[in-house]
Amino acid sequence: MSSKNAFLTFEGSDKAIPLNIVSGSDGPDTLDITSLYKEAGVFTYDPGFLSTASCNSSITYIDGDKGILRYRGYPIEQLAEQSSFLEVAHLLMYGELPKKTELNDFSNIITRHTMINESLLRFFEGFHYDAHPMAMVIGVVGSLSAFYHDSTDIKNPRHREISAHRLISKMPTIAAAAYKHNRGEPVIYPRNDLSYAGNLLHMMMATPCEDYVIDPLAEKALDLLFILHADHEQNASTSTMRLAGSSGSNPFACVAAGASSLWGPAHGGANEAVLNMLKEIGHASNVEKYIAKAKDKDDPFRLMGFGHRVYKNYDPRAKIIREVCYEVLNKLADANNPLFELAMNLEEQAVSDDYFVEKNLYPNVDYYSGIIYRALGIPESMFTVMFAIARTAGWVSHWMEMLDDPRHRIGRPRQLYQGAAIRDYVPLEQRA
């Protein structure tokens, strides 16, 4: 990391405020304004943090203009083609691709900690039968701190590592239990002989009545989706998790906070919104009409799953998952299903429309992931839960990185106050 100087001046003043311009290993330079209020008595104003670097991180790099996504320097395209989710989780946590023995040890730890305390399963009985799975997951994940007191000393690096392992291990088990409760079916326990993605499919789809055979393509598609969703820099949920963690909260509470942010339809709920949009459109014959509605500034309808807050080019994750999406549809779903036919028709028309091309509104990863989940038999209410399982690897990696940074401090954003000026209290009987 290198730095150079910049100077801030104000009209009518000869004073120049020195500010450091910090250069990272990649991406735009960053103006260090930590001393701005002290030196100049002013705040910066940046709603949505569009131009603000909230932290120093070495985990994920994104160039939205060029459509680049890298985990620890490795292009997402290479990881998606050659890696596995657990290998990627290890990479995010520890900074390097593991050696064979390291990956075996890590996979063994994650696999053998998938069981959750039996008392936790009784928590689900307290939720209404039709409770949203994310509501259950957030509640149960937050409660893990009541069961694992032995690893909640955030100042202890080993405790932090154990907690991270537990969260990655137990999230699929908690998610599957929420799914089973929602369906009124008995919980299926994890199996140590299955892969991470295969285990989740088994816990969700198996029943005590008959054997469940995991389809290799379904397992491959789910593992790939987990890789693509594992981390995405300082998004809303990761920033929420970091802010919660900055106060010294335990890791389970921090991940529950991140999951709460993820639940929003503008973030992790986007793939669920895609399916709802397709249902609203109804049939391929209506696509042209709805594309016109999307282009009408006075019409509230928007194409969900197109465009991205960061990527001003094609979402690199969408390019990767598109091919697998078609594989899944051809093998595991009815190719003549009207919903899938509609989705492909909408994609074809939108990407050839000058309006969407000029605005770089290409299908993003949420567009295809929702279609894949639906083809795998996973209901829309579970889409954000699947996202949360994958993103847990990124959340715990950022949490560990933050606590390892000697410069980290409790988050305390400031504001531009535009409320009432000072005024005196008026007794009730004197108010007009």
Image (cartoon, rainbow, N blue to C red):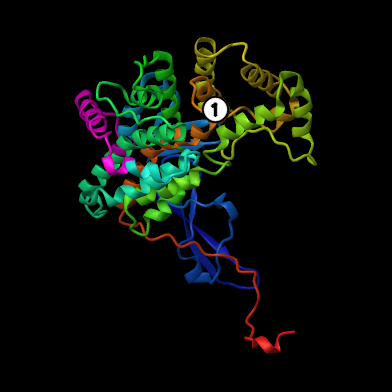
Relative to 124, 375 lies left or right: right
The residue pinned by badge 1 equals 370
Q: Residue at left 33%, top 42%? A: 122
Within 10 angstroms of label 1, few (less than 14), some, or many (20 or more) residues? many
Relative to 48, 297 lies left or right: right
Q: Residue at left 43%, top 38%? A: 388
User: Can the viewer see residue 120?
Assistant: yes
Residue 288 in the magenta stretch? The answer is no
As drawn, 240 above or below 125: below
Q: Main secondary structure of the magenta part?
A: helix
As drawn, 324 above or below 39: above
The spot of residue 395 in percent (x, y) is: 39, 43
User: Can the viewer see residue 95?
Assistant: no
Residue 117 in the magenta stretch? The answer is yes
The front one of 286 and 100 is 286
The spot of residue 355 in percent (x, y) is: 75, 29
**Label 1: which secondary element:** helix
The number of numbered discs placed on residues in the rendered structure image is: 1
Position of the C terminus, as image quadrant, is bottom right
Type of residue at label 1?
Answer: Gly
The quadrant holding residue 97 is top left
The front one of 124 and 66 is 124
The spot of residue 160 in percent (x, y) is: 26, 47
Relative to 289, 410 lies left or right: left
The front one of 186 and 343 is 186
The quadrant holding residue 209 is top left
The quadrant holding residue 295 is top right
Q: Residue at left 65%, top 17%? A: 338
Q: Which residues are magenta?
A: 92-121
The spot of residue 272 in percent (x, y) is: 57, 33
As drawn, 254 above or below 189: below
